[in-house]
Amino acid sequence: MSDSHTNRLTQSFLGRAFLLVAPLYLAAIIVAPHGARGDEHDESGRNFVEACRAAANNFPDHNTDMFKAGICVGQIAAMEFSGGELVEQKLRSCVPDDVTHLQMAKVVVGYLDGHPDLLDKPLTILITVALAQTWPCRR
């Protein structure tokens, strides 16, 4: 079996697994009362905006919360990988292959800065919308 075939199979499996798990994860985030999660589990855009900004600026500040920045970049990478497979067409994103994670982080931060009224929403949802509005799928 060729490496490209194995990679496609792996991506297909991971994509399907994400499609099964992501809706449950998002539903749990949305439904759980904020106080029940506690601040250490605050997944809002407000809690991550500065860490995402640091990632988008290639970490100029050594005081950055690297854990939060890693979560931000990881969620961006996850949506890059699976965004074209979402059930809801208007939330699908098809990021071109030549776009870097740094460029995607800049798009996400621009979206967060442009929509301060939405910062209490989960970061995952905000990333999904930012990427879909910037790179919608044409299928």
Image: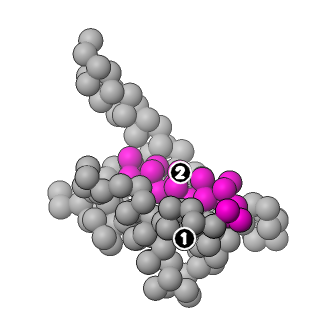
Circle 1 sits on which residue?
Answer: 53
Quick check: 7 above or below 41? above
Quadrant of the rendered image containing residue 61: bottom right
Visible residue check, residue 6: yes
Closest to the camera, between mark 2 and mark 1, is: 1
Residue 101: mark in rendering: none
Whichever of labels 2 and 1 marks the residue nearer the N terminus, that label is 1
**Residue drawn at the location 43% of the way across and 69% of the way down:** 106
Between 80 and 89, the residue placed more toward the observer is 80
Of the pair 100 and 30, the residue shown nearer to us: 100
Query: Which x, y percent locates residue 4?
Result: 26, 24
Q: How is the image coloured?
A: one colour
Residue 11 picture quarter: top left
Residue at the spot 50% in from the left edge and 78% down from the top edge: 112
User: Is 65 placed above or below 126 here?
Assistant: above
Q: Which mark is residue 74?
A: 2
Number of dots carrying numbers: 2
Indicate the secondary structure of the residue bearing disc 2.
helix
Query: Type of residue at label 1?
Result: Arg
Q: Write the start and end of the magenta stretch as one range.
A: 62-82
Left-right relation of 28 to 55: right
